[in-house]
Image (cartoon, rainbow, N blue to C red):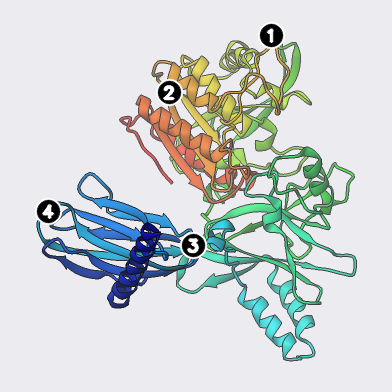
């Protein structure tokens, strides 16, 4: 009985002392530093009111002496303690288990000298905010805000005037952000009807992001559906709009059935007259086969892709070519510069590009990338020497398989196609003046061609190269899922494992060519990884990132950049360079 009374008395005395001490202690506040001085080994106390689950972060400057920070719970019991000396961080963090008044005592260690210090609580994060991230503020279009205000004010013609203005301006509506010279607002619009339940701005599956991140919202009860995005002022890309696309699962896995449903109803933006990739041969309604395109105000110019008056034009010859190694037949296109002569004493440099029909006039109408025009302009401006270009097509249905770094195709390239162009045209045999290049899988195949045959190809031009892909072995079928041969960063690993080769590189990747699943298996990440590996191995690398996605609209400009960097500098002293 005596012992119990003594324990109760001791607890009561402790509680009273804690209360009296707290009453005179300074309360800590977020962001407000408290200066203090320790003398005669006495502790200095502070209070901090907290809610259950609060995360607390504080910085302590010990200055002249070692410190012990002791934290007492609202009950008065010792909760945590931190030693602050050169071997420990000056930052303390803890989570409050209960709500109430916490006490922090600052004291010197045993035998330490007196000295000054400061303590500041830098952050208190409530449990609710930690459990579910705060919503990201969505950019707001000034024009949409104005329309909403006009509607709320009862202006009779506000909606009709808005749609009339949109038809004049075209979409997306581009609006500046005050004080921001790097980004602008782009608002995509859809004029809905009674059947409209939702609309998605589609860049997928050309990565950029997950479709649900680009779902439009409806302005009140009007027919205005919109999505405003903060986009870099240098962006250039293509997109579609998909009404009533349905919700795609938040798992962010690339479910092919979901992608199929998304793309089935996607169409060009009816408020944007600029269309892209039109195929006049296809019988389908153009709005379901074309894409819409837009350029932000500061999108880089593409001066070499436009015809210029007075520039001598080269010619393109089309030849049927049968491969004995591959047992198939394809079209080869050969670009000859203006004034080409088979008897010229100095052989012409050689460019080999995959996806040949992308560069020439064909059934798709104008070329997706004006290859002849670009070469004509660069040669006339003396940015590159006169060159011959071999543009290689693929037999129907074989493109992905052949360009997936297949050793049989690359053997045919080296043993059949390049010898053929050398035998029939006056071109170099010097790998330093021979370039191999391509887009997407073509970029992957170009890097593989130089890796396997550096004695033939001394320059690689890879635009948005598919370096995240692991080629299946030649005996295995092409697989985009569940590839048993898959390895992370396969292309980079090949160059890590090989000796340094006499090859120069020009690599590009788009800032939107990312993996929405977060696994990093994308063009942007894999291109950066390959760049870093090549630089570490001592290669000459020219690297560019453009603001855009996986499309010809951007590639038509960066083709010229690569040709200038690789062929225009062919006789210059080699240097390691990076560009962005």
Q: Looking at the image, which residue is at 56% across and 16% down?
A: 422
Q: Earlier in the sequence, mark 1 or mark 3?
A: 3
Callouts 1 and 3 close, C-beta under 8 Å:
no
Q: Secondary structure at mark 2?
A: loop
Q: Looking at the image, which residue is at 57% across and 19% down?
A: 425
Would residue 347 be seen by someone viewing this image from the given angle? no
Q: Earlier in the sequence, mark 4 or mark 2?
A: 4
Callouts 3 and 4 close, C-beta under 8 Å:
no
Question: In the rendered image, which residue does mark 4 sit on?
Answer: 112
Would residue 377 be seen by someone viewing this image from the given angle? yes
Question: In the rendered image, which residue does mark 3 sit on?
Answer: 98
Q: Is residue 454 above or below residue 540?
A: above
Instruction: For label 3, count other residues whose C-alpha is less than 10 Å away and answer few (under 14), some (14-19) or many (20+).
Output: some
Would residue 307 be found to the left or right of residue 247 on screen?
left
- Viewport quadrant of the N terminus: bottom left
Q: Position of residue 120 (x, y in %)?
A: 30, 66
Question: In the rendered image, which residue does mark 1 sit on?
Answer: 325
Which one is in front, 435 or 208? 208
Q: Secondary structure at mark 1?
A: loop
Mark 4 and mark 1: Cα distance apart in space: 83 Å
Question: In the rendered image, which residue does mark 2 sit on?
Answer: 503
Q: Earlier in the sequence, mark 3 or mark 4?
A: 3
């Amino acid at each position: 009985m005596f012992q119990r009374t003594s324990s109760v008395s001791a607890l009561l005395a402790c509680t009273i002392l804690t209360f009296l001490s707290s009453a005179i202690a300074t309360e800590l506040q977020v962001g407000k530093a408290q200066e203090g001085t320790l003398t005669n080994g006495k502790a200095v106390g502070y209070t901090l009111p907290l809610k259950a689950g609060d995360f607390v972060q504080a910085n302590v400057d010990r200055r002249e002496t070692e410190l012990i920070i002791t934290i007492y719970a609202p009950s008065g019991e010792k909760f945590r303690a931190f030693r602050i000396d050169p071997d420990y961080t000056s930052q303390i963090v803890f989570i409050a288990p209960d709500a109430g008044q916490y006490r922090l005592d600052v004291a010197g260690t045993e035998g330490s000298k007196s000295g000054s210090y400061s303590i500041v609580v830098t952050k208190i994060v409530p449990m609710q905010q930690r459990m579910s991230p705060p919503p990201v503020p969505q950019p707001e279009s000034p024009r949409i805000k104005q329309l909403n205000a006009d509607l709320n004010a009862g202006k009779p013609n506000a909606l009709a005037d808005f749609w009339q203005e949109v038809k004049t301006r075209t979409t997306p509506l581009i609006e500046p952000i005050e004080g921001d010279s790097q980004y602008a607002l782009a608002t995509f619009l859809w004029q809905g009807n009674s059947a409209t339940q939702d609309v998605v701005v589609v860049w997928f599956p050309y990565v950029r992001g997950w479709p649900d991140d680009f779902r439009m919202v409806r302005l009140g009860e009007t027919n205005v559906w919109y999505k405003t995005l903060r986009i870099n002022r240098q962006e250039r890309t293509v997109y579609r709009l998909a009404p009533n696309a349905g919700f795609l699962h938040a798992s962010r896995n690339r479910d092919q059935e979901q992608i199929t449903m998304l793309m089935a109803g996607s169409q060009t933006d009816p408020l944007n007259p600029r269309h892209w990739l039109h195929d006049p041969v296809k019988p389908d309604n153009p709005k379901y086969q074309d894409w819409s395109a837009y350029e932000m105000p500061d999108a880089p110019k593409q001066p070499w892709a436009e015809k210029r008056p007075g520039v001598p034009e080269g010619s393109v010859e089309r030849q049927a070519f049968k491969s004995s190694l591959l047992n198939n037949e394809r079209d080869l296109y050969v670009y000859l510069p203006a004034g080409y002569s088979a008897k010229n004493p100095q052989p012409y440099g050689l460019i080999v590009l995959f996806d040949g029909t992308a560069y020439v006039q064909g059934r798709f109408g104008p070329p997706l990338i004006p290859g002849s025009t670009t070469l004509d302009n660069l040669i006339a401006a003396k940015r590159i020497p006169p060159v011959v270009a071999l543009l290689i097509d693929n037999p129907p249905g074989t493109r992905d398989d052949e360009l997936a770094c297949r050793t049989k195709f690359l053997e045919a390239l080296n043993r059949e196609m390049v010898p053929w162009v050398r035998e029939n045209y006056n071109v170099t045999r010097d790998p330093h003046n021979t370039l191999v290049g391509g887009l997407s899988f073509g970029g992957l195949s170009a890097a593989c061609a130089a890796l396997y045959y550096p004695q033939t190809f001394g320059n690689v031009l890879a635009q948005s190269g598919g370096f995240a892909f692991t080629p299946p072995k030649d005996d295995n079928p092409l697989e985009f899922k569940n590839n048993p041969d898959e390895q992370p960063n396969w292309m980079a690993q090949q160059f890590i494992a090989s000796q340094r080769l006499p090859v120069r590189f020009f690599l590009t990747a788009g800032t939107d060519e990312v993996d929405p699943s977060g696994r990093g298996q994308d063009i942007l990440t894999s291109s950066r990884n390959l760049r870093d590996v090549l630089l570490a191995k001592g290669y000459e690398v020219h690297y560019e990132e453009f603001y855009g996605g996986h499309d010809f609209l951007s590639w038509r400009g960066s083709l010229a950049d690569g040709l200038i960097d690789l062929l225009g500098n062919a006789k210059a002293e080699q240097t390691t360079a990076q560009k962005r």
